[in-house]
Image (spheres, rainbow, N blue to C red):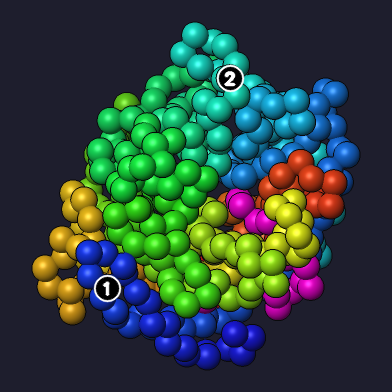
Amino acid sequence: MKKKNKSWKLVASLFTASTLFYSQFSTALEKLDFIGEYSLPTSTSYQDVLFGGVSGLYFDAEKSIYYGISDARNTKQEGVSRFYTLTMNIDKQGIHSVNIMGMKNLLDKDGKIWSNGQVDAEGIAPTPNGKGLFWTSELGIALRITDFDGSFIADYNDVIPPYYNVLGIADKTSKVGVRSGTSFEGVSLTPDKKNVFISVETALKQDGPISTPLNSSPARLLKYDANSQTNELTLVGEYIYNIDPIPDVSEFAVNDNGVSDILAVNEHQLLFIERAGRNASKGYDDWDFNIRVYLGDISKSTNIKGMETLSDIKEKSQFQPITKKLLIDFSDYTKTPDNIEGITFGPVIDGHKTLVFVTDNNFQSYQSNKFYVFIDSNDILK
């Protein structure tokens, strides 16, 4: 997919009680301009704590501060659950520096550090009233708000439908809900602060399989109306985003693909990061990646709000998933795309938006903390 305006057809499948097939078309957009990348080695420390595990990124343009959330799970190697404040020197010539300005531990209702196995922080976004930060977790309650000092404000367990079975994720016998390790990832507030989106990395168990080299995976996207004063969220939509089949496989037969983060462009368009990983050597610690970023649109998508399983769809031939257009294929810009898990709008340069991406180094010595920057010179995302 290296040429502009190249169309291709993806035959996706939803595996429910019976297997159903439908077609989804995706076209390539005009390209964004890649202006550079910057790395901080895994050995980088702040306040005697290793810097790393950054799985989500949010840029506060008024303060010129980036918030990066770490998926550290209170282990000896990773440290406690936390988020960082960062500054970056970015101009049209590229990204010249990344500076760690602060670090705050994420705290529970009692003001204590989360224990190992309680949370696995992934996404981060501002609240509608601007007084806190949303963050998602692959463990425990899926969505919470923290203050800028890391203290607990609220959890949002009641806004996630019961058929996501969030708190039953450890039950391997359950056939309903999110999967362990591939549950809630992205969270994003629309620029007008009226809607919040949350994404699931892969399909719910009852909706279909995870991606393989032969089939796609129907992941859910949740849309909420947001109260700009109280941060109250009301579920107004659920949509299906078809994750691509695994594009490149490993000889060691360990491969995956899923949505690692989202970014709302407006109330109906979002950017989706599809991160496909494969083992580069025997074992589970050495990975190579294919990273693609799609512009998705829910305008014409079927709203399945309240539908427990896709097998309940009555008019299957009329079901419309989220339409998607390829915006970035990282293999066009770098020979070794890393584990990209975070995306945010960066500073406006000469009237054009920028996108800043961050990698999760998984606290592994063979990986690093990378930041990639693109400028939307063609104003695709206006």
| Quadrant placement of the N terminus | bottom right
Disc 1 element: strand
Residue type, mark 2 in image: Ser
In this view, the residue farthest toward the front is 173
- Drawn side of residue 264 relative to residue 113, left or right: left
Q: Earlier in the sequence, mark 1 or mark 2?
A: 1
Q: Is residue 160 magenta?
A: no
Vertical comparison of 350 with 200: above or below:
below
**Place of residue 184 in the rendered image (x, y in percent of width and height, measured from the top left):** 45, 45
The part of the image, by quadrant, that contains residue 228 is: top left
Q: Residue at x 70, y 62 (%)?
A: 279
Give the magenta-colored segment's residue range: 326-342
* Identity of the residue drawn at 80% across and 26% down: 49
- Point 50% across, 70% down: residue: 212
Task: Pick the residue in front: 327 or 174.
Answer: 174
Q: Residues within 10 Å of mark 2 (few under 14, many from 20)?
A: some
Q: Is residue 158 left or right of residue 44?
A: left
Q: Nearer the viewer, residue 224 or 302?
A: 302
Identify the residue position indicated by label 2 in the image: 115
Name the residue tied to disc 1.
19
Q: Nearer the viewer, residue 312 or 172?
A: 172
Element under disc 2? loop
Residue 121 in sight in this render: yes
Query: Looking at the picture, how far across and down is residue 251, in whole percent?
Result: 70, 72
Q: Disc 1 and disc 2: Cα gap in Å? A: 41 Å
Tell me, yes or no, whether the highlighted magenta stretch contains residue 341: yes
At 88% from the left edge and 39% from the top edge, which residue is drawn?
43
- The 10 Å Cα crowd at callout 1, few under 14, some 14 to 19, many 20 or more, is few
